[in-house]
Amino acid sequence: MIHQILRTCVCLIVLSAQGKCNWPAREETEEYWNEAAEKTLHKIYGKDNLKRNPARNVILFIGDGMGLSTATAGRILKGQNDGRPGEETVSALDKFPNVGLSKVYCVDKQSPDSASTATAILSGVKTKFGVLGLNGRAVHKKCSSAAGNEVESILTRSANLGKSTGIVTTTEVQHATPAAAYAHSASRGWYVDSAMNSTVKSEGCKDISLQLLAMGRKINVVLGGGRSYMRPDGAYDEEYFSRRPGMRDDRRDLIREWKNLQPSNKARYVWRRSALNAVNAKNTDYLLGLFQPKELRYDHDRRNDIAGEPSLEEMTEKAIQILRKNPSGYFLLVEGGKIDHAHHYNQANIALREFLAFEKAIQKAMDMTSTENTLIVVTADHGHVFTLGGYADRGNPIHGYARNHNEPRKAVDKLQYTSIAYANGPGYTLDTATGKRKAITGDTTRDITYRYQAAVPLSSETHSAEDTVVFARGPMSYLFTGVYEQNYIAHAMMFASCVGNTF
């Protein structure tokens, strides 16, 4: 105990002066976060002696980058798409009876990334920026720091207890959020062996795609993008033929190897929407669907071409149909991953449409499940420096410039401004002739790819450090009320579904 106190003092006093460490050393341990979450769990669970009704199934929705402003603006856009003013609209999220706030900072950063936050949400342990499925003792991009510092996710725990499990995402299945459910990596960027240098490989670290394969049949359903990372260099893609070949240096075809895992006539691999829709859930126990070489398209770009991509709603529906056959229950992770991508480019019109696609998937899950046996948790891993306001009139188009009594509001520079804005990012613009902001029009801002104006010029807009909202419904959903550390979410889900520690 004395040793730990001394180590903490050294970290806070000495190392902070050198710019190396600004946090207590104990936060790098799994035990610290587990104990803290257990205390919160005891406090909330014991409140009013509420009766325990365990959840057989858990569905976790993570809107990557879906801060509160995104959820609010998305709700307004939904209503305006239906011809209403918009502000009064009720989204699927508004139907959840229990709401809380989670603190998203990671061990070493005030504003986190998706690897550290997904590790917290899925494994119950906070870690460092860029680190995946490891505790805070791991060092970013240092392979040798991974061994012995692995943390176990709720997906793995559920599978080990005989539950079915699934992952659905609009990004690559190797991306930070889905990968946190099954991988342990000192770098979130090690999707494929060709992304790892010789030193990393010599130290024995495995790329994330290989770790996905190593899970074997523990994951029943995997749907998203990422075919290139599963195929050898030079292997052509079934959709694009000579374009976008595989990226693996080890010459392995992991898709073929997945098909051969414990051969079963109930395992299916699909790569286009029509094939997914044709899958008979009754005769399918294992499903791998990879619908793009890398990430999926934005929802507004999906079209009926030779392959076609399923929507997030369609993938969620198919996953639930397959997983719910297990009488022991299931755990399903669903990520709306491209909300985040659009925000990084200051493209709010795309981000909000990605939110609407995410919201449809949530509603589908609500329609297909019962609050008696299925806990649904919806949250964001982090937000963005995205905001809306400006004293616009009621019903003002969310993508338009702010109006007052149907007249555009003007800023100090005598130019109109939009209700939507970013604190930083590539949307920063100045007129070189005047040195002022460039003038904007309502027609410009309606364009789907429009970059909204930002205050600070950056090549990519940043994540925010603000708390994210947690929505919950179903058995023991009251556990998610209040304000808590982000890693608590995993402990509450595990406790509610009897796959973690109980008391």
Image (cartoon, grey):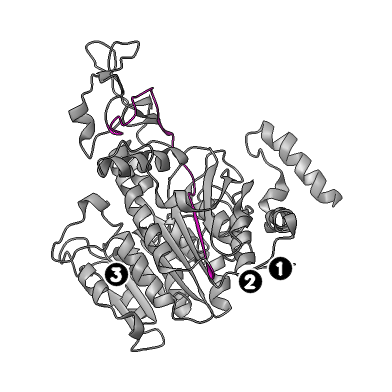
Q: Which residues are magenta?
A: 372-399
Label 1 SS = loop
Residue at horizontal 21%, vertical 12%? Answer: 433
Residue 490 in the image: above or below residue 417: below
Q: Which mark is residue 498?
A: 2
Q: How many marks?
A: 3
Nearer the observer: mark 3 or 2; the answer is: 2
Residue 153 % position (x, y): 56, 65
* Residue 476 percent across, percent down from the top left: 61, 62
Label 2, secondary structure: give it: loop
Marks 2 and 1 in Cβ contact (< 8 Å): yes
Question: Front-most of 372 and 333?
Answer: 372
What secondary structure predominates along the stretch shown in magenta? loop
State the residue position of label 1: 502
The relative height of residue 466 versus residue 25 in the rendered view (above or below) is above
Nearest to the observer: residue 389 or residue 116: 389
